[in-house]
Image (cartoon, rainbow, N blue to C red):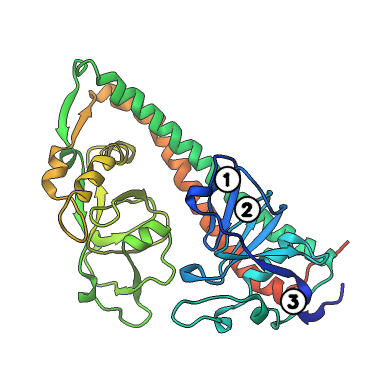
């Protein structure tokens, strides 16, 4: 086993503040712009060689760490590694992720990370050979998560293309024989969530509250809690279709674990139509719903029940629906399976990371 070395963070890596790049200065290109929250669009010029690591230095993304495998533009909202000092870049990414920067805020009201403050952090790191072994294990998990993400982008694009071809394009010249026109609220039940403060948690017997923020994030980290004594129809399970009808209007297939349905969210279900059918039709009308909400003269735009009724759905005859079902259902099933696998892999990575980065769990080095 290789020995671990004690040193300051400033001896481990060299850091520098990123560079200004306003929206007006950006030019079309494929170079990632890496800021405090990770990739923030692209540019045509790279000024840092990949692989690279950036650390959010201000705002809500203070202390967040991101990895970029390619050449990139480091934005001024982040610090970026300018010198790995012989350390493995991907290990450096995981090592910096394991540090708690909250006590090193050099700002006041606005959190700010200064390299001179964090250079003083005392660290203990393995030799490069063990660094590479650790990065290989954690990287393999992240690589599979990223592969699942890209695969799901393809599956979602395929499902939308098929839907466009079979339901939108095919009905442009008129409704085919045997088809019906219904309102969106006729093909599915849109169950509005509860004011969950009326169901306070009871010790450890509780559920995470799924609000718009959790829907957007895809997980329940840091969520409020509610008791489990709420009616069963308001409990969300993996694979449920959720639709936020106010504020930020979005439609997603939830794969973030069991939770409680908060107000301002619909849980969408149907006793007569398959999940892909009401999910894709709701997504089809989402842009119109967003426009309707944006035109509301309120601080939080929203839609109402009559908008669901006015959103038209084209329903094919049963035999054709069954044929379509054989194409769409496997796509959604695989998409859900990939998301659930990624959640499991992320949990394994997060459990291994502190053990590997502290030396509690050692990796054999060839």
| Label drawn at residue 181 | none
What is the spatial separation of the Cα atoms under label 2 and label 1, in whole angstroms?
Answer: 8 Å
Residue 169: give x, y in percent of width and height: 31, 21
* Residue at 23% over, 59% down: 264
Say if mark 3 contacts mark 1, CB within 8 Å: no
Picture quarter containing residue 179?
Answer: top left
Question: Where does the image place residue 208, in percent across and percent down from the top left?
Answer: 36, 69
In the rendered image, the vertical position of residue 108 relative to residue 261, given as above or below = below
Residue furthest out toward the left: 306
Residue 73, numbered circle = 2
Question: Foreground: 47 or 244?
Answer: 47
Residue 97 image offset from top left, x and y in percent: 62, 69
Q: In the image shown, does 88 or 192 lie closer to the viewer?
A: 88
Q: Position of residue 319 (x, y in %)?
A: 28, 22
* Mark 3 and mark 1: Cα distance apart in space: 30 Å
Q: Residue at x 29, y 62 (%)?
A: 235
Distance in Å between CA atoms under marks 2 and 3? 22 Å
**Residue at point 80% right, 82% down?**
6
> What residue is disc 1 on?
43
The earlier-in-sequence mark between 2 and 3 is 3
* In this rendering, position of residue 236 left or right of residue 198: right
Local packing at callout 2 (Cα closer than 10 Å; few below 14, some 14-19, many 20+) is many
Question: Helix, strand or loop at disc 1?
Answer: strand
Which of the labelled discs sits on residue 10, or is there none?
A: 3
The answer to whether one can see residue 287 in this image is yes
Q: Earlier in the sequence, mark 3 or mark 1?
A: 3
Judged from the image, the secondary structure of the residue bearing numbered disc 3 is helix
Q: Nearer the viewer, mark 2 or mark 3?
A: 2
């Amino acid at each position: 086993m290789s020995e671990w070395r004690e040193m300051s963070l400033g001896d481990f890596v060299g850091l520098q503040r990123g560079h200004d790049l306003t929206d007006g200065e950006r030019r079309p290109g494929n170079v990632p712009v890496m800021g405090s929250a990770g990739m923030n669009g692209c540019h045509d010029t790279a000024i840092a060689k990949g692989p690279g690591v950036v650390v959010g230095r201000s705002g809500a993304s203070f202390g967040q760490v991101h990895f970029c495998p390619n050449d990139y533009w480091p934005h001024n909202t982040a610090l970026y590694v300018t010198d790995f000092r012989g350390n493995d870049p991907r290990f450096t990414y995981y090592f910096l992720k394991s540090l708690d920067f909250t006590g090193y805020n050099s700002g006041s009201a606005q959190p700010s990370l200064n390299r001179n403050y964090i250079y003083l952090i005392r660290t203990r790191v393995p030799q490069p050979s063990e660094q590479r072994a650790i990065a290989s294990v954690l990287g393999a998990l992240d690589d599979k998560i990223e592969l699942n993400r890209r695969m799901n982008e393809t599956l979602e694009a395929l499902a939308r293309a098929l839907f466009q071809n079979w339901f939108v394009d095919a009905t442009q010249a008129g409704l085919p024989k045997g088809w019906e026109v219904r309102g969106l609220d006729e093909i599915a039940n849109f169950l509005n969530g509860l004011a969950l403060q009326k169901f306070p948690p009871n010790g450890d017997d509780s559920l995470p509250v799924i609000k718009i923020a959790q829907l957007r994030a895809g997980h329940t980290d840091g969520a409020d809690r509610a008791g489990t004594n709420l009616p069963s129809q308001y409990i969300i399970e993996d694979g449920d279709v959720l639709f936020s009808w106010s504020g930020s209007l979005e439609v997603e297939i939830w794969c973030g674990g069991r939770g409680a349905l908060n107000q301002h969210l619909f849980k969408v279900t149907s006793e007569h139509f398959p999940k892909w059918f009401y999910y894709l039709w709701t997504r089809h009308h989402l842009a119109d719903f967003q426009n309707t909400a944006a035109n509301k003269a309120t601080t939080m735009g929203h839609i109402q029940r009559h908008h669901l009724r006015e959103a038209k759905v084209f329903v094919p005859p049963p035999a054709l629906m069954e044929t379509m079902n054989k194409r769409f259902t496997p796509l959604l099933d695989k998409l859900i399976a990939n998301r659930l696998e990624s959640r499991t892999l992320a949990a394994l990575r997060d459990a291994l990371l502190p053990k590997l980065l502290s030396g509690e769990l050692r990796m054999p080095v060839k």
